Image (cartoon, rainbow, N blue to C red):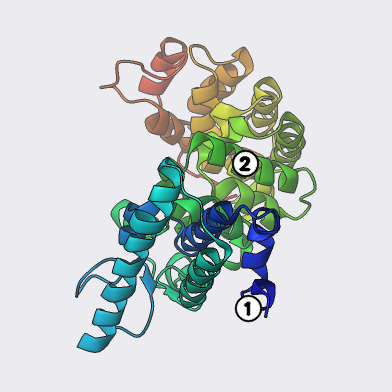
Amino acid sequence: MSLETRVQKQLWTAITRNYENENFTGAVIDSIHVLSQLIRDKTGLEGDGAPLVGQALGGKPPKVPLLKLNKLQTESDWNTQAGIEQILRGVYMGIRNPRSHGQHNDSRSDADAIILFLDYLIRIIDQSKTVFDPKAFLKERVFDKHFVKLDRYAQLVASEIPAKHRLDIAIEVFRERENGNGHQLHYFFDALHPLMTPEEVDQFCVVVSEELKVAETDSAISSAIQVPPYDCWSKYAEQARLRIEGMLITSIESGLFIRFSDECPAGVLGTWTVTIAKHFTLKEQLIAAILTRLTSYRPPAQNYYFQYLDCTLFDLCVPKLPSEAVEAYKKGLSAGDVRFYDSLDRVYDPFSLCPCSSWSDLEDAYKAFVAAPDEVPF
């Protein structure tokens, strides 16, 4: 009976060339490569040899190994786990290393015996249970309704992800973002992002960019802004950024807020601008759109500005506000409109080393403010 019919297909495929060319030592080494890669794939680890085996299968109660060969409920179970771990260490130390570091010529019969034994070990590893199950992790950790919205909790959750799985988890969470709590997912991403390599972050940003190039609904766009770290915005493709920034600006230009009922009947999408405004490419257009709300004669349009955008305008216009903004504030303050006074209270910190833009132009009107007796609750 030929060796091909006695081992798994994936193993035979890996060793075929060397084995059929009668390079039997090379075929043995190929077999061990298959074993190593299987362990890496199942655990997300990136090591090799005995250290890889120790990280994957090692551990004593109460520590649970990354790869469980059985239920680990009895002393016999743990002995089996430890025994296979030691055998695998021996494979690298006693079989692979001598063949990799020196002259070694295996006969066909020796190679067949070793490869058949390695096939047995590969079957054991292939049937093992990994502690990290991506689907279970997403359901039970990331999208858990009891997820605690704290930085430390999010860091603990993110630390459970093996390095090799971080990019895949990030992409999957982003794609499923509309099925979760955006605030919760933002905490998770803020914790995961520092653990990813620069290359992984770049790949993730490509995925987000492609989504933003075609996203149409407010929910898809707002969640794509909310969930990843806000400073990723500048890393997305320019086409994607310009498209979404244009949509946000258009939304702001129609924005309304009814104070009496605490409703935003128009411009909801535009409110997400505040989280990424400092990263905008279209900053001049954004400032112009915000000014249309501030200088509008319609109270609901001005309310939209005061409810969502006043701090953003001041942040974008350092060191000096546009003249039309200064005039709008002066006019509102002199009319006793408490919205303008409260707005300056929000953006001006007298203890700051950098007071709000154009404070010198507004200070006198602010100090002279007297609230009008009857405020209409638009």
Compare marks 1 and 2 and give the one earlier in the sequence: 1
Q: Is residue 81 above or below residue 247?
A: below
Name the one closer to the observer, 365 or 290.
290
Q: Dot 2 surroundings within 10 Å: few (below 14), some, or many (20 or more)?
A: some
Residue receiving disc 1: 6
Please determine whether, in this image, residue 3 is positioned above or below residue 266: below
Residue sitting nearer the eye, 187 or 79: 79
Q: Which mark is residue 203?
A: 2
Residue 132 marker: none
Residue 159 visible somewhere in the drawing: no
Q: Secondary structure at mark 2?
A: helix
Closer to the camera, 317 or 168? 168
Viewer-side label of 1, 2: 1
Crowding at dot 1, Cα within 10 Å, few <14 / some 14-19 / many 20+, comes out as: few
- Left/right placement of residue 150 relative to residue 300 reads left
**Residue 180 in the image, given as x and y percentages of width and height:** 55, 66
